[in-house]
Amino acid sequence: MNINFEYHEVAASPRLEAFVAERLNKLENKFDSIVGADVYFKKENTSNPEVGKICSVRLSMPGATIFAETSAASFEASVAKVITELRGQLQKRKEKLETH
């Protein structure tokens, strides 16, 4: 799987990239139709300390593209939430395809 990282007003982090790659590879092992992923990290100016670090992921695969975005206090928490959302969307798509 090809993973592209993009940062907006955030310094690039090899540790964060490795964390995301590990999580996405686990998803790819379960759902083998994933071809690539575009991962976006950005900061949001907010007074609430619970949010502000945004992670967005767009998965490339046959058919419609799958997208998820979350905001949390840290990028690691945002990544965890995004992966959970993506897993749910992928599971829904897999079930839909198996019924046909």
Image (tube, rainbow, N blue to C red):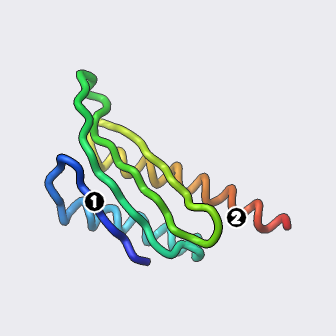
Q: Residue at x 26, y 35 (%)?
A: 44
Q: CA distance from mark 1 to mark 2?
A: 28 Å
* Residue 38, image quadrant: bottom left
Q: Residues within 10 Å of mark 1 (few under 14, many from 20)?
A: few
Residue at the right extreme, as displayed: 100
Q: Amino acid at mark 1?
A: Glu
Q: Residue at x 49, y 63 (%)?
A: 59
Residue 41 vertical position relative to residue 1 in the rendered view, above or below = above
Q: Amino acid at mark 2?
A: Lys
Q: Residue at x 59, y 75 (%)?
A: 33
Residue 54 picture location, percent across and down? 33, 43
Residue 88 picture location, percent across and down? 60, 52
Q: Is residue 14 left or right of residue 67?
A: left
Indicate the secondary structure of the residue bearing disc 2.
helix
Between disc 1 and disc 2, whose residue precedes? 1
Q: Which residue is mark 1?
A: 6
Look at the image and tell me in which quarter the C terminus lies.
bottom right
Residue at the left extreme, as displayed: 11
Residue 60 vertical position relative to residue 84 in the rendered view, above or below = below
Q: Is residue 66 left or right of residue 69?
A: right
Q: Residue at x 43, y 67 (%)?
A: 37
Circle on res. 28: none
Q: Residues within 10 Å of mark 2 (few under 14, many from 20)?
A: few
* Residue 31, image quadrant: bottom right
Residue 20 picture location, percent across and down? 34, 62
Look at the image and tell me in which quarter the N terminus lies.
bottom left
Q: Which residue is mark 2?
A: 94
Q: Is residue 50 left or right of residue 26?
A: left
| Marks 1, 2: nearer the viewer | 1
